[in-house]
Image: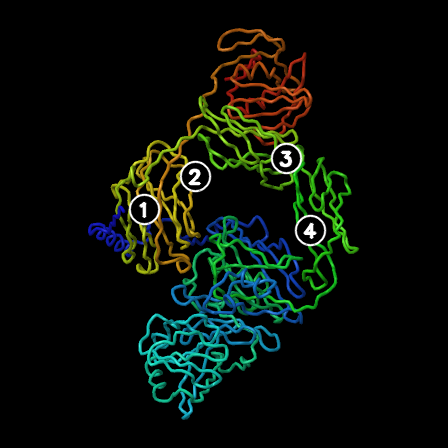
Amino acid sequence: MNLQKIKTTQPLLKKITGICIASTLIVSALQPLGLGNLAPSINVATAATTPKLSVPAWVNIKQEPLTAGAYLRNYVWSSIRANKEIHTDVSVVEVDLQNAYVRLDVMTGVNNQTTIKDSVRDMANSTGAVAGTNGDFFNTQSENVPMGADIAQGVLMTSPQLETPGYYNFAITADNKPVVDMFSFQGQVQTADGAVFPINGVNKSYYWTESPTVHHSHDNSIFVYTNAWGKTGRAVDRNANLKEVLVQNNVIQQIADKGALPIIAPVDGYILRTEGTAAQFVRDHMHVGDPITSTYGIIPQDPTKTYDTSKFKMMIGGQTILVDNGKPSAYSRTSAEIGGYRSRTGIGYSQDQRYAYLITAEASNDSAGASIAEFQQIMVAAGVWKGMNLDGGGSTQLVARPLGSTTVSMVNQTENSYERPVVNGVGVYSSAPKGSLKGLVFTGSNAVFLNEPVTFTLKGYDEYYNPIEVPADTKWTDASGIGTFEGNIFKAKKTGTATVKATVGGISQTLKVQVIGREDIASLSLVPATPFLSEDATIPLTIKVTTKSGVSRTISAAGLPMEISGFKGEINGDKLHVTSLDGSTMGQIVVHYDGFSSMLTLPIGTSTLWADFEKVNPTLSYEAYPVGVTGAVYNINNEIHLQYDFTGGGASNKASYAVFGDPEKGTPVKGEPQKLSLRLYGDNSLNMLRTEAFDKNGKLQRIDIVKSINWTGWKTVEVDLSSLNLVYPISIQHIYVASPALGQDERATTGEIYFDDVIFSYKTALPQLAKNQVKLTINKRTITVNGTSKTIDQAPLNIDGNTLVPVRFVIEQLGGAIKWDPKEEKVSILRGNQLIDFWIGKKDFIMSGTAATSLAAPQIINGRTMVPLRVLSEKLGWTVTWNDKTKSITLE
């Protein structure tokens, strides 16, 4: 075994310390080492410079019933942020609390266990919820239990934290009235001899109080743990003077001599966890076999409030209040705790207390997220009179059951493309009786291609909008005759609009389906999985189509006619297999659909092994940022193991670096690589993997390799470098694990990743086109090519102000090729990486996969195809010189 461990050197430690000192003095002048641009900056535009919105600020784009008394409504919220217009996707589940067939309740972990996290989707499906969202905040470094109160089905699962002011809760009273308020807890145990001792909580992990004093939550305290606590350890950060007591049926069954009982509390009992003076109370007053009484409950923090909390149907803990009296409120907790533009989750109710709202705002590639202040505006727009913040960021998940479905689906896109397990959530439940078939729901595309097999499915719902089984005798037809059905699979034979109809149980549902033809397409492109060809490579191909009506679809390339040239290969379904590149300078693939053609030109690629850490093994060292972060880098069996421990370093950006070569200069990379790939063993930490490279000008470039390590095991990961505008050559300085300060509590603080086989890939230059010069004169058959006169049989013409030229002669002289299709009367021009299709007598043409229109249509004159010169010059990038005196044109 080749075992190498490299620790931080003393000079490096001094360097990092210096950086930390500088950052405390000149914050704006320093980007933390290796983590620049990870956290968003917040800019406030002045009224004088703030642009106006181009769209309404609040737009309802879709709504659908979930069950009787519950709707899912989707909105786009727009605003101005840093003088730029932004758009955020917002989803709202509206629940009518006056509807007897719907209720809100808390979903708690796996199998109702507070200590076993689960995704919102799994919690909803396992409990039969028709919709749900994530719930309370939780400490990811402890036993993963809610920080606030949790009442599910009227049973207290966890109590609020004591002496931590500002945390709000949402509850439903016995008469179905919503409540948003702050609550506390009180309780006591009474022993057989009449002695009493206060209880400080139920099913709580350890925490630190804030006011009036700061101390450990379990100091000198008794806490109750029920069967809902699904672990044998309780508040396990310490065992100082710990003593636990098992109670069943109000009788003491067992008292630990010292320490914890290695059991989970039984269904008919509970465990008292005691420390310090509370443990001494056990020694003085409790004995096995004695009866014991424990009484406890939730109380309002405001003693003037008169809630009957013992009859609350549900309660979920949250954080700061956000909306009060229909307006953004002052924060009860500092907004800095939940800063940045993130995904958000909130809950609230309407002014008349009839409706409850579950609300999420999405942060994704297509949605701008929200600051906490922006989320207040969103909640007000959604109709909230009083509402509070729930856990957000990577925890934000909203699920809903589509009409006719039996299970829920994700509504929002999560921040890390990962459904994070959370401690609890708010579920929407239906108790409606089974009804009769009311309606049908189609699933299937409404824009299809010729001969594409499209599966349509049919689901039913009853008068309560709950799913109902559809009888098996569904009849599928296409009234237009454009396509045919085999069972529920539709295949179109002609272009146009099909009317797909399903009939069952006397109820029919129709769907208009566009069968896309050439005239409908705005653009069609062939998309390869890699940007170049390499020997023996297998490259998946997809087709991206956008119609003139704005519909976009990505489909498999399988089944579409394709031609390859410039190399040897074969098309199998939707994959291109390269068999030989001998003598190749580039490769071209042309795909055809209903007369619409598009060409993909790929350069020849080469790959270079930059490091395999055996034969090619750059010098390695280790760095960390900031002071307090620790780790190490190892070479084990020719694989790099990079460890990190982010528990230290405070609330800042953190990184653990593998350093290549000179720490100030890095290790050079030859040429101009277009792609970086490496084998990576992920640890499912949700941390980032990045690399840092110096470019030709000495500028440090930070490149994301993986934005979220959300898997365990080996995987080959790739980075497209071609879009980063790097100034070559570059030198790799670091490959490192990073944890930005924003959302840091959602990622693992310790772990280890491995990587190996760092490869850079390159593309060769495309062949140079012929640089000929062609001179033509209107109405003259004599032309000049590179100074040599030639005679052609059809002169250029000016027709209605448009110059038409003989296409074959001009294109061939300028290094292109012509193909004629007599059946379609189509002329195809191929020059370099460009393909143009013209049709005789039609102004519409296709240029490199995009539909366009010219001012003049091609014509056949004296047996020669004449095309508009303006199109050729503009689309092929020629330089055109016009001499008005001689009526001559020079092309080059």
**Can you say whether 194 is above or below 653 in the image?**
below
Disc 3 is placed on an element classified as strand
Marks 3,4: beta carbons within 8 A: no
Q: Determine which of the numbered discs, if any, sits on residue 614 in the image.
A: none
Mark 2 burial class by Cα count in 10 Å: few <14, some 14-19, many 20+? some
From the image, tell me which residue sits under label 3.
Answer: 521
Residue 581 percent across, percent down from the top left? 45, 25
Q: Earlier in the sequence, mark 2 or mark 1?
A: 1
Q: Residue at x 72, y 43 (%)?
A: 486
Q: Amino acid at mark 4?
A: Phe
Residue 135 percent across, percent down from the top left? 50, 65
Residue 661 percent across, percent down from the top left? 26, 41
Q: Residue at x 34, y 53 (%)?
A: 752
Distance Cα–Cα, label 2 vs label 4: 39 Å
Q: Of residues 26 and 356, which is closer to you in this image? A: 356
Q: Is residue 133 left or right of residue 278?
A: right
Q: Residue at x 63, y 29 (%)?
A: 853
From the image, tell me which residue sits under label 4.
Answer: 442
Q: Determine which of the numbered discs, if any, sits on residue 640 in the image.
A: 1
Distance Cα–Cα, label 2 vs label 1: 22 Å
Quarter of the view holding residue 823: top right
Mark 4 burial class by Cα count in 10 Å: few <14, some 14-19, many 20+? some
Q: Earlier in the sequence, mark 2 or mark 3?
A: 3
Res 610 visible: yes
Mark 3 burial class by Cα count in 10 Å: few <14, some 14-19, many 20+? many
Distance Cα–Cα, label 1 vs label 3: 49 Å
Q: Amino acid at mark 1?
A: Ile
Distance Cα–Cα, label 3 vs label 4: 25 Å
From the image, tell me which residue sits under label 2.
Answer: 720
Q: Amino acid at mark 3?
A: Ile
Q: Of residues 803 and 867, which is closer to you in this image? A: 867
